[in-house]
Amino acid sequence: MTFTYGRNIRLTLFGESHGAAVGVTCDGLPAGMKIDEGYMEKWLDLRRPWGDISTARREEDKPVILTGVFEGRTNGGPLTIVIENKAQRNGDYPERILRPSHADFTAYTKLGGFNDYRGGGSFSGRMTAPLVALGSVLGKALEESGIYIGTHVSRCGEISDDDFDEAGGEELKELLLSLRDKRFAVIDDEKGEEMTALIKRAAAEGDSVGGTLETAVYGLPVGIGAPFFDSLESVIAHLAFSVPGIKGIEFGLGFGFAYLTGSEVNDQLVSDNGRIMTKSNFSGGINGGISNGMPVIFRTAVRPTPSISKKQQTVDIETMEEKELELKGRHDPAIIHRARVVMDSVTAIGLFDLMLEKDRDIWRGNF
Ligand SMILES: Cc1cc2nc3c(=O)[nH]c(=O)nc-3n(C[C@H](O)[C@H](O)[C@H](O)COP(=O)(O)O)c2cc1C
Protein backbone atom coordinates (compact mmCIF):
# COMPACT_ATOMS: atom_id res chain seq x y z
CA MET A 1 0.00 0.00 0.00
CA THR A 2 1.42 3.41 -0.90
CA PHE A 3 0.41 7.01 -0.25
CA THR A 4 2.46 8.45 -3.10
CA TYR A 5 1.18 10.10 -6.29
CA GLY A 6 2.63 11.98 -9.24
CA ARG A 7 5.03 11.73 -12.13
CA ASN A 8 6.81 15.08 -12.40
CA ILE A 9 6.07 15.99 -8.84
CA ARG A 10 5.91 13.16 -6.29
CA LEU A 11 3.77 13.74 -3.26
CA THR A 12 3.40 11.48 -0.24
CA LEU A 13 0.60 11.86 2.26
CA PHE A 14 1.28 10.77 5.83
CA GLY A 15 -0.45 10.59 9.18
CA GLU A 16 -3.69 9.29 10.66
CA SER A 17 -6.94 10.84 11.84
CA HIS A 18 -6.23 10.23 15.53
CA GLY A 19 -2.41 10.13 15.46
CA ALA A 20 -0.10 13.07 16.14
CA ALA A 21 -0.49 14.77 12.77
CA VAL A 22 -1.35 14.55 9.09
CA GLY A 23 0.91 15.96 6.41
CA VAL A 24 2.37 15.87 2.94
CA THR A 25 5.82 15.97 1.45
CA CYS A 26 6.18 16.92 -2.21
CA ASP A 27 9.32 16.31 -4.23
CA GLY A 28 10.08 17.70 -7.70
CA LEU A 29 8.68 21.21 -7.30
CA PRO A 30 10.52 23.85 -9.30
CA ALA A 31 12.58 26.23 -7.16
CA GLY A 32 11.35 29.80 -6.77
CA MET A 33 7.61 29.20 -6.35
CA LYS A 34 6.02 31.74 -4.00
CA ILE A 35 4.64 30.28 -0.78
CA ASP A 36 1.77 32.36 0.54
CA GLU A 37 0.89 30.98 3.98
CA GLY A 38 -2.14 33.27 4.28
CA TYR A 39 -3.51 31.83 1.05
CA MET A 40 -2.85 28.29 2.32
CA GLU A 41 -4.78 29.04 5.52
CA LYS A 42 -7.66 30.48 3.48
CA TRP A 43 -8.00 27.25 1.49
CA LEU A 44 -7.67 25.13 4.64
CA ASP A 45 -10.34 27.22 6.30
CA LEU A 46 -12.79 26.32 3.51
CA ARG A 47 -12.28 22.63 4.38
CA ARG A 48 -12.60 23.11 8.14
CA PRO A 49 -15.85 22.02 9.79
CA TRP A 50 -18.19 24.84 10.74
CA GLY A 51 -21.68 25.50 12.08
CA ASP A 52 -24.14 22.67 12.69
CA ILE A 53 -23.73 21.11 9.23
CA SER A 54 -20.29 19.65 9.97
CA THR A 55 -18.64 17.34 12.47
CA ALA A 56 -18.27 18.67 16.03
CA ARG A 57 -14.56 17.80 15.85
CA ARG A 58 -13.03 21.24 15.43
CA GLU A 59 -9.38 21.12 14.40
CA GLU A 60 -7.41 24.32 14.15
CA ASP A 61 -5.70 23.06 10.97
CA LYS A 62 -2.66 25.29 11.33
CA PRO A 63 -0.12 24.25 8.66
CA VAL A 64 3.54 24.15 9.62
CA ILE A 65 6.04 24.20 6.75
CA LEU A 66 8.96 22.04 7.84
CA THR A 67 11.16 21.86 4.74
CA GLY A 68 11.54 23.10 1.17
CA VAL A 69 11.04 26.84 1.64
CA PHE A 70 13.69 29.55 1.93
CA GLU A 71 12.79 33.22 2.21
CA GLY A 72 9.19 32.63 1.10
CA ARG A 73 9.96 30.58 -2.01
CA THR A 74 10.48 26.89 -2.74
CA ASN A 75 14.15 25.98 -2.62
CA GLY A 76 14.07 22.93 -4.90
CA GLY A 77 13.99 20.41 -2.04
CA PRO A 78 10.95 18.45 -0.87
CA LEU A 79 8.22 20.72 0.49
CA THR A 80 6.91 19.24 3.75
CA ILE A 81 3.77 20.55 5.40
CA VAL A 82 2.53 19.17 8.72
CA ILE A 83 -0.86 19.77 10.34
CA GLU A 84 -1.08 18.68 13.97
CA ASN A 85 -4.13 16.79 15.23
CA LYS A 86 -5.26 18.47 18.43
CA ALA A 87 -8.94 17.66 18.84
CA GLN A 88 -8.88 13.87 18.57
CA ARG A 89 -10.89 11.88 21.16
CA ASN A 90 -9.76 8.28 21.12
CA GLY A 91 -12.57 7.18 23.44
CA ASP A 92 -14.97 7.54 20.49
CA TYR A 93 -13.51 4.31 19.09
CA PRO A 94 -13.40 1.91 22.05
CA GLU A 95 -13.63 -1.28 19.98
CA ARG A 96 -13.36 -2.54 16.46
CA ILE A 97 -16.71 -1.52 15.12
CA LEU A 98 -17.09 -2.01 11.39
CA ARG A 99 -19.03 0.98 10.15
CA PRO A 100 -21.20 0.02 7.17
CA SER A 101 -19.85 1.56 3.95
CA HIS A 102 -16.80 3.03 5.67
CA ALA A 103 -13.35 1.54 5.07
CA ASP A 104 -13.18 -0.33 8.41
CA PHE A 105 -13.74 -3.82 6.98
CA THR A 106 -11.54 -3.41 3.90
CA ALA A 107 -8.76 -1.74 5.90
CA TYR A 108 -8.84 -4.48 8.57
CA THR A 109 -8.70 -7.24 5.98
CA LYS A 110 -6.05 -5.66 3.76
CA LEU A 111 -3.79 -4.77 6.66
CA GLY A 112 -4.27 -8.00 8.58
CA GLY A 113 -5.83 -6.24 11.56
CA PHE A 114 -2.87 -3.86 11.99
CA ASN A 115 -4.84 -0.85 10.77
CA ASP A 116 -5.27 2.20 13.01
CA TYR A 117 -9.05 2.08 13.27
CA ARG A 118 -9.48 5.28 15.27
CA GLY A 119 -11.52 7.64 13.13
CA GLY A 120 -10.67 5.62 10.02
CA GLY A 121 -6.90 6.09 10.59
CA SER A 122 -5.21 6.81 7.27
CA PHE A 123 -8.47 6.16 5.37
CA SER A 124 -10.03 9.23 6.99
CA GLY A 125 -11.30 12.40 5.29
CA ARG A 126 -8.82 14.14 7.61
CA MET A 127 -6.05 13.12 5.19
CA THR A 128 -7.49 15.65 2.75
CA ALA A 129 -6.27 18.58 4.91
CA PRO A 130 -2.64 18.26 3.71
CA LEU A 131 -3.92 17.73 0.15
CA VAL A 132 -5.59 21.12 0.45
CA ALA A 133 -2.44 22.72 1.89
CA LEU A 134 -0.40 21.52 -1.09
CA GLY A 135 -3.26 22.24 -3.51
CA SER A 136 -3.26 25.87 -2.39
CA VAL A 137 0.43 26.23 -3.31
CA LEU A 138 -0.04 24.69 -6.75
CA GLY A 139 -3.39 26.47 -7.26
CA LYS A 140 -1.68 29.80 -6.56
CA ALA A 141 1.06 29.02 -9.09
CA LEU A 142 -1.59 28.13 -11.69
CA GLU A 143 -3.46 31.37 -10.97
CA GLU A 144 -0.32 33.34 -11.59
CA SER A 145 -0.31 31.78 -15.05
CA GLY A 146 -3.96 32.72 -15.62
CA ILE A 147 -5.49 29.33 -14.75
CA TYR A 148 -8.35 29.43 -12.22
CA ILE A 149 -10.07 26.46 -10.58
CA GLY A 150 -13.38 26.56 -8.71
CA THR A 151 -15.98 24.14 -7.41
CA HIS A 152 -19.55 24.58 -6.22
CA VAL A 153 -22.12 22.27 -4.65
CA SER A 154 -24.26 21.64 -7.71
CA ARG A 155 -26.69 19.28 -6.00
CA CYS A 156 -27.57 18.15 -2.51
CA GLY A 157 -30.36 15.61 -2.21
CA GLU A 158 -33.10 16.86 -4.56
CA ILE A 159 -31.92 20.49 -4.56
CA SER A 160 -29.93 21.76 -7.57
CA ASP A 161 -27.79 24.89 -7.94
CA ASP A 162 -27.32 26.67 -11.30
CA ASP A 163 -24.70 25.14 -13.60
CA PHE A 164 -21.47 26.79 -14.67
CA ASP A 165 -21.87 28.47 -18.04
CA GLU A 166 -20.55 25.76 -20.36
CA ALA A 167 -19.15 28.30 -22.82
CA GLY A 168 -17.06 30.09 -20.19
CA GLY A 169 -15.61 33.57 -20.74
CA GLU A 170 -14.30 36.23 -18.36
CA GLU A 171 -17.49 35.94 -16.24
CA LEU A 172 -16.62 32.33 -15.47
CA LYS A 173 -13.28 33.44 -14.00
CA GLU A 174 -15.05 36.02 -11.82
CA LEU A 175 -17.57 33.40 -10.71
CA LEU A 176 -14.81 30.96 -9.78
CA LEU A 177 -13.06 33.64 -7.75
CA SER A 178 -16.30 34.64 -6.00
CA LEU A 179 -16.90 31.03 -4.90
CA ARG A 180 -13.68 31.26 -2.84
CA ASP A 181 -15.38 33.80 -0.59
CA LYS A 182 -18.30 31.49 0.17
CA ARG A 183 -18.14 28.93 2.92
CA PHE A 184 -21.06 27.06 1.36
CA ALA A 185 -20.09 27.35 -2.30
CA VAL A 186 -23.16 27.72 -4.49
CA ILE A 187 -23.96 30.04 -7.39
CA ASP A 188 -27.53 30.64 -6.16
CA ASP A 189 -27.38 31.44 -2.43
CA GLU A 190 -31.08 30.65 -1.91
CA LYS A 191 -30.42 27.10 -3.08
CA GLY A 192 -27.50 27.04 -0.66
CA GLU A 193 -29.84 27.87 2.21
CA GLU A 194 -32.21 25.08 1.16
CA MET A 195 -29.30 22.64 1.01
CA THR A 196 -28.08 23.75 4.43
CA ALA A 197 -31.57 23.17 5.87
CA LEU A 198 -31.61 19.69 4.32
CA ILE A 199 -28.24 18.83 5.88
CA LYS A 200 -29.46 20.08 9.28
CA ARG A 201 -32.60 17.93 9.01
CA ALA A 202 -30.50 14.86 8.18
CA ALA A 203 -28.19 15.61 11.13
CA ALA A 204 -31.16 15.95 13.52
CA GLU A 205 -32.37 12.53 12.41
CA GLY A 206 -28.92 10.97 12.90
CA ASP A 207 -28.63 10.56 9.15
CA SER A 208 -26.51 12.02 6.32
CA VAL A 209 -26.92 13.29 2.75
CA GLY A 210 -24.82 13.30 -0.42
CA GLY A 211 -24.66 15.45 -3.50
CA THR A 212 -22.64 16.45 -6.52
CA LEU A 213 -19.84 18.96 -6.98
CA GLU A 214 -19.20 20.79 -10.23
CA THR A 215 -15.64 21.91 -10.93
CA ALA A 216 -14.46 24.28 -13.67
CA VAL A 217 -10.97 25.20 -14.83
CA TYR A 218 -10.70 28.52 -16.65
CA GLY A 219 -7.69 29.53 -18.74
CA LEU A 220 -6.10 26.13 -19.29
CA PRO A 221 -4.11 26.36 -22.54
CA VAL A 222 -4.66 23.95 -25.43
CA GLY A 223 -2.47 20.85 -25.29
CA ILE A 224 -2.44 19.64 -21.67
CA GLY A 225 -2.83 15.87 -21.34
CA ALA A 226 -2.19 12.83 -23.53
CA PRO A 227 -4.30 10.48 -25.62
CA PHE A 228 -4.21 7.35 -23.46
CA PHE A 229 -3.03 6.65 -19.94
CA ASP A 230 -2.30 10.23 -18.92
CA SER A 231 -5.38 11.68 -20.56
CA LEU A 232 -6.64 14.78 -18.78
CA GLU A 233 -9.78 12.86 -17.83
CA SER A 234 -7.71 9.94 -16.45
CA VAL A 235 -5.50 12.19 -14.35
CA ILE A 236 -8.41 14.19 -12.92
CA ALA A 237 -10.48 11.04 -12.32
CA HIS A 238 -7.54 9.30 -10.60
CA LEU A 239 -7.15 12.20 -8.21
CA ALA A 240 -10.89 12.74 -7.72
CA PHE A 241 -11.34 9.09 -6.74
CA SER A 242 -8.45 9.48 -4.31
CA VAL A 243 -10.73 11.68 -2.22
CA PRO A 244 -12.65 9.53 0.28
CA GLY A 245 -16.38 9.54 -0.39
CA ILE A 246 -16.22 10.35 -4.14
CA LYS A 247 -18.16 7.73 -6.08
CA GLY A 248 -18.64 9.09 -9.60
CA ILE A 249 -17.32 11.55 -12.17
CA GLU A 250 -18.48 12.88 -15.54
CA PHE A 251 -16.83 15.35 -17.91
CA GLY A 252 -18.89 17.86 -19.89
CA LEU A 253 -22.22 16.31 -20.78
CA GLY A 254 -20.94 13.02 -19.33
CA PHE A 255 -23.63 10.37 -19.02
CA GLY A 256 -25.96 12.74 -20.90
CA PHE A 257 -24.14 11.80 -24.13
CA ALA A 258 -25.92 8.45 -24.03
CA TYR A 259 -29.28 10.01 -24.89
CA LEU A 260 -28.34 12.32 -27.77
CA THR A 261 -27.06 12.28 -31.36
CA GLY A 262 -23.74 13.49 -32.74
CA SER A 263 -25.40 16.42 -34.47
CA GLU A 264 -26.88 17.51 -31.15
CA VAL A 265 -23.69 17.31 -29.11
CA ASN A 266 -20.72 17.94 -31.41
CA ASP A 267 -19.05 21.20 -30.40
CA GLN A 268 -18.93 23.31 -33.58
CA LEU A 269 -15.58 25.00 -34.21
CA VAL A 270 -15.31 28.76 -34.65
CA SER A 271 -12.44 31.11 -35.41
CA ASP A 272 -12.25 34.02 -32.99
CA ASN A 273 -9.46 36.60 -33.40
CA GLY A 274 -6.97 33.99 -34.57
CA ARG A 275 -8.02 31.54 -31.87
CA ILE A 276 -9.96 28.32 -32.47
CA MET A 277 -12.82 27.83 -30.02
CA THR A 278 -16.05 25.86 -29.90
CA LYS A 279 -19.60 27.24 -29.84
CA SER A 280 -20.78 24.81 -27.18
CA ASN A 281 -18.72 22.88 -24.62
CA PHE A 282 -20.43 19.50 -24.30
CA SER A 283 -16.96 17.91 -24.35
CA GLY A 284 -16.05 19.69 -21.10
CA GLY A 285 -12.91 21.26 -22.57
CA ILE A 286 -11.20 17.95 -23.43
CA ASN A 287 -10.80 16.14 -26.78
CA GLY A 288 -8.57 13.10 -27.20
CA GLY A 289 -7.48 13.37 -23.57
CA ILE A 290 -6.01 16.83 -24.24
CA SER A 291 -7.32 20.26 -23.22
CA ASN A 292 -8.88 22.16 -26.14
CA GLY A 293 -8.72 25.64 -24.63
CA MET A 294 -12.36 25.76 -23.51
CA PRO A 295 -13.11 25.56 -19.77
CA VAL A 296 -12.61 22.08 -18.35
CA ILE A 297 -15.84 21.15 -16.61
CA PHE A 298 -16.59 18.02 -14.60
CA ARG A 299 -18.95 16.82 -11.91
CA THR A 300 -18.23 14.43 -9.07
CA ALA A 301 -20.73 12.45 -6.99
CA VAL A 302 -20.24 12.54 -3.23
CA ARG A 303 -21.84 9.82 -1.14
CA PRO A 304 -23.81 10.52 2.04
CA THR A 305 -21.33 10.29 4.94
CA PRO A 306 -21.13 6.61 5.99
CA SER A 307 -20.98 7.29 9.76
CA ILE A 308 -24.54 7.94 10.92
CA SER A 309 -26.06 7.52 14.35
CA LYS A 310 -29.21 5.73 13.11
CA LYS A 311 -29.30 2.02 13.94
CA GLN A 312 -27.45 -0.14 11.39
CA GLN A 313 -26.44 -3.76 11.07
CA THR A 314 -22.83 -4.82 11.26
CA VAL A 315 -20.65 -7.79 12.17
CA ASP A 316 -18.37 -8.17 15.19
CA ILE A 317 -14.96 -8.80 13.60
CA GLU A 318 -13.76 -10.87 16.60
CA THR A 319 -16.76 -13.22 16.95
CA MET A 320 -18.17 -12.98 13.39
CA GLU A 321 -21.61 -12.44 14.94
CA GLU A 322 -24.05 -9.98 13.45
CA LYS A 323 -24.86 -7.10 15.77
CA GLU A 324 -26.70 -3.81 15.84
CA LEU A 325 -24.68 -0.62 15.67
CA GLU A 326 -25.63 2.76 17.10
CA LEU A 327 -22.67 5.03 16.42
CA LYS A 328 -21.63 7.71 18.86
CA GLY A 329 -18.85 10.18 18.09
CA ARG A 330 -18.53 13.22 15.84
CA HIS A 331 -19.30 12.98 12.16
CA ASP A 332 -20.17 15.14 9.18
CA PRO A 333 -23.86 14.92 8.23
CA ALA A 334 -22.64 15.82 4.72
CA ILE A 335 -19.21 15.96 3.10
CA ILE A 336 -19.92 18.02 -0.02
CA HIS A 337 -19.51 21.53 1.41
CA ARG A 338 -16.09 20.62 2.82
CA ALA A 339 -15.00 18.49 -0.13
CA ARG A 340 -15.36 21.31 -2.68
CA VAL A 341 -11.94 22.82 -1.86
CA VAL A 342 -10.49 19.31 -1.79
CA MET A 343 -11.67 18.95 -5.38
CA ASP A 344 -10.04 22.30 -6.28
CA SER A 345 -6.85 21.05 -4.64
CA VAL A 346 -6.59 17.66 -6.34
CA THR A 347 -7.39 19.34 -9.66
CA ALA A 348 -4.53 21.80 -9.08
CA ILE A 349 -2.20 18.90 -8.23
CA GLY A 350 -3.10 16.99 -11.42
CA LEU A 351 -2.86 20.01 -13.71
CA PHE A 352 0.42 21.18 -12.21
CA ASP A 353 1.93 17.73 -12.65
CA LEU A 354 0.80 17.58 -16.29
CA MET A 355 1.92 21.12 -17.03
CA LEU A 356 5.45 20.42 -15.87
CA GLU A 357 5.44 17.74 -18.54
CA LYS A 358 4.18 20.06 -21.26
CA ASP A 359 7.03 22.48 -21.31
CA ARG A 360 9.06 22.74 -18.18
CA ASP A 361 11.06 25.82 -19.20
CA ILE A 362 8.19 27.99 -20.38
CA TRP A 363 6.12 26.99 -17.34
CA ARG A 364 8.95 27.79 -14.92
CA GLY A 365 9.18 31.30 -16.26
CA ASN A 366 5.68 31.97 -15.01
CA PHE A 367 6.31 31.73 -11.28
C1 LIG B 1 -13.59 16.28 4.02
C2 LIG B 1 -14.14 14.90 4.30
C3 LIG B 1 -14.73 14.64 5.53
C4 LIG B 1 -15.26 13.38 5.80
N1 LIG B 1 -15.86 13.17 7.03
C5 LIG B 1 -16.38 11.95 7.32
C6 LIG B 1 -17.00 11.69 8.59
O1 LIG B 1 -17.10 12.56 9.46
N2 LIG B 1 -17.50 10.45 8.81
C7 LIG B 1 -17.45 9.46 7.85
O2 LIG B 1 -17.93 8.36 8.07
N3 LIG B 1 -16.88 9.68 6.65
C8 LIG B 1 -16.33 10.89 6.35
N4 LIG B 1 -15.75 11.09 5.13
C9 LIG B 1 -15.84 10.04 4.10
C10 LIG B 1 -15.07 8.79 4.41
O3 LIG B 1 -13.73 9.11 4.67
C11 LIG B 1 -15.20 7.79 3.25
O4 LIG B 1 -16.53 7.60 2.89
C12 LIG B 1 -14.60 6.46 3.67
O5 LIG B 1 -13.22 6.60 3.81
C13 LIG B 1 -14.88 5.34 2.69
O6 LIG B 1 -14.36 5.65 1.43
P1 LIG B 1 -15.29 5.62 0.14
O7 LIG B 1 -16.57 6.29 0.51
O8 LIG B 1 -14.51 6.40 -0.89
O9 LIG B 1 -15.48 4.19 -0.23
C14 LIG B 1 -15.20 12.34 4.84
C15 LIG B 1 -14.57 12.60 3.59
C16 LIG B 1 -14.06 13.87 3.32
C17 LIG B 1 -13.43 14.13 1.99
Image (cartoon, rainbow, N blue to C red):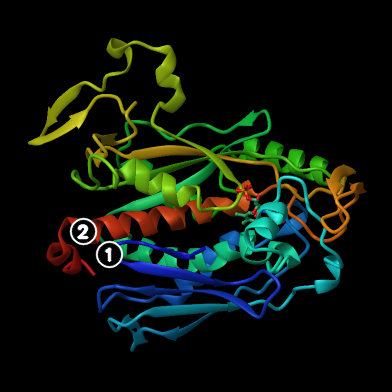
Q: Amino acid at mark 2?
A: Glu
334 left or right of 274?
right
Look at the numbered disc 2 and give the secondary structure of its residue. helix
Residue 174 shows in this picture: no
Q: Amino acid at mark 1?
A: Asn
Which comes sooner in the sequence, label 1 or label 2? 1
Is the residue 330 above or below the residue 73 in the image? Answer: above
153 left or right of 358?
right
For the point 52% across and 55% down, the residue is 341
Marks 1/2: CA distance? 7 Å
Provide residue 355's location: percent of width, then percent of height. 24, 57
Q: Which residue is mark 1?
A: 8
Q: Quadrant of residue 11?
A: bottom left
Provide residue 94's location: percent of width, then percent of height. 86, 68
Q: Quadrant of residue 107?
A: bottom right
| Local crowd size for mark 2, using a 10 Å CA cut-off: few (<14), some (14–19), many (≥20) | some
For the point 48% across and 69% down, the residue is 133
Look at the numbered disc 1 and give the secondary structure of its residue. loop
Is the residue 158 above or below the residue 291 in the image? Answer: above
Q: Nearer the viewer, residue 285 or 89?
A: 89
Provide residue 227's location: percent of width, then percent of height. 23, 40
| Local crowd size for mark 1, using a 10 Å CA cut-off: few (<14), some (14–19), many (≥20) | some
Q: Are marks 1 and 2 in contact (CB under 8 Å)?
A: yes
Task: Identify the disc placed on residue 174.
Answer: none
Residue 64 shows in this picture: yes
For the point 27% across and 55% down, the residue is 354
Q: Quadrant of the C terminus?
A: bottom left
Q: Which residue is mark 2?
A: 357
Provide residue 299's location: percent of width, then percent of height. 48, 37
For the point 52% across and 31% down, the residue is 162
Name the residue furthest bottom. 71
Is the residue 239 above or below the residue 112 in the image? Answer: above
